Amino acid sequence: MTAADLLQVAAGGLLMGLVYALVAAGLSLIFGLMDVVNFAHGELMMLAMYAVFAIWAVNGTDPLLLLPIVAVLLFGIGIAIYHGLIARALSVQFNRGMVQIFVTFGLAIFIRGACQFVWGGDFKSITGHWLAGRTIELGGVYLPLPQMAASAICLAAFAGLLVIGRTEFGRALEATREDRDAVALIGIDRNRIFALGWGLGAGAVGVAGVMLAGFYYVGPNVGASFAVIAYVTVALGGFGSMLGALVAGILIGEVEAFTAAFWEPSLKQVGVFAVYLAVLMLRPRGLFGRL
């Protein structure tokens, strides 16, 4: 394999890794805020992809134009999920952890089944949009524009999440993360922070779903495959660490790309789990974990 081939593989891993990082960022935000693992996280991404496909199928609107609409839609869905399900699960006095698991897992099954009922089990794809089939060449490395746009938007959204952390809301978010009971003494509404945290987490994965819809297939099981990578990314980077999600997402993208290049493409996730297990043997909290 030549140097140009290695650069091509590395570039592909970086582009996909940034998408993984954003998907994992929303999951890490929710877990770091309230110690709840959202097993429906992948299905929320799938819901965003189906929303893009449905609107595109009706009037041909380009996915890039639908980005703010779907992101706001997923933000609202995240808040609704918190108020309708998670707040009730958090109020349970016994076996709270199991209740939270079953609630989010049941939500995942419901969303997946509803999408399959409406759109069927066949794979869908969005074609003919602005960036479809276009590539650029940089020093002999060919970069597909849909993947480049997806990675750039995901990186910008990730930066936005980090900027939010420096605002007054971000400080309230951090205070609630540190001590969810004591924040009431300084006038912070814990339920409001939790709801907005769920909204941000769902909005982040919605952005990733919109960008993925431009070059990835849309199907009822697509969320589950990305959710597995997101769980590994969060654990590898460190539960609750946004920086860890970014670093781990890029690392997983690179390992996956090089495993597919040097081994069977169908076994590309073997390298990911091998690195994950190796890191956890040396650092169980993950690369940047504090929990």
Image (cartoon, rainbow, N blue to C red):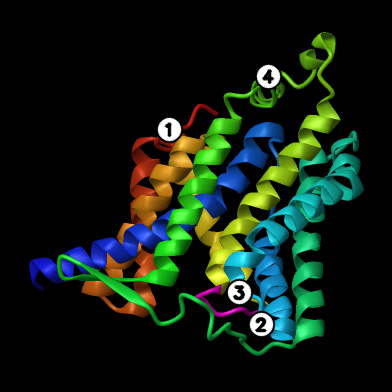
Residue hosting label 3: 62
Instruction: Give SS at disc 1.
Output: loop
User: Given this view, does label 4 or label 1 mark the residue nearer the observer?
Assistant: 4
* Horizontal side, residue 53 vs residue 268: left or right: right
Q: Sequence order check: which comes first, mark 3 or mark 4?
A: 3
**Marks 1/3: CA–CA distance:** 38 Å
Q: Residue at x 82, y 68 (%)?
A: 110
Residue hosting label 4: 175
User: Given this view, does label 2 or label 1 mark the residue nearer the observer?
Assistant: 2
**Marks 2/4: CA–CA distance:** 44 Å
Q: Which residues are magenta?
A: 214-219
Residue 243 rendering spot, x and y as whole percentages? 45, 36
Q: Sequence order check: which comes first, mark 2 or mark 4?
A: 2
Residue hosting label 1: 288
Q: Residue at x 74, y 45 (%)?
A: 199
User: Given this view, does label 2 or label 4 mark the residue nearer the observer?
Assistant: 2
Residue hosting label 2: 60
Q: Which amino acid, mark 4?
A: Ala
Does residue 40 show up?
A: no
Residue 193 rendering spot, x and y as whole percentages? 77, 31
Residue 221 rendering spot, x and y as whole percentages? 63, 75
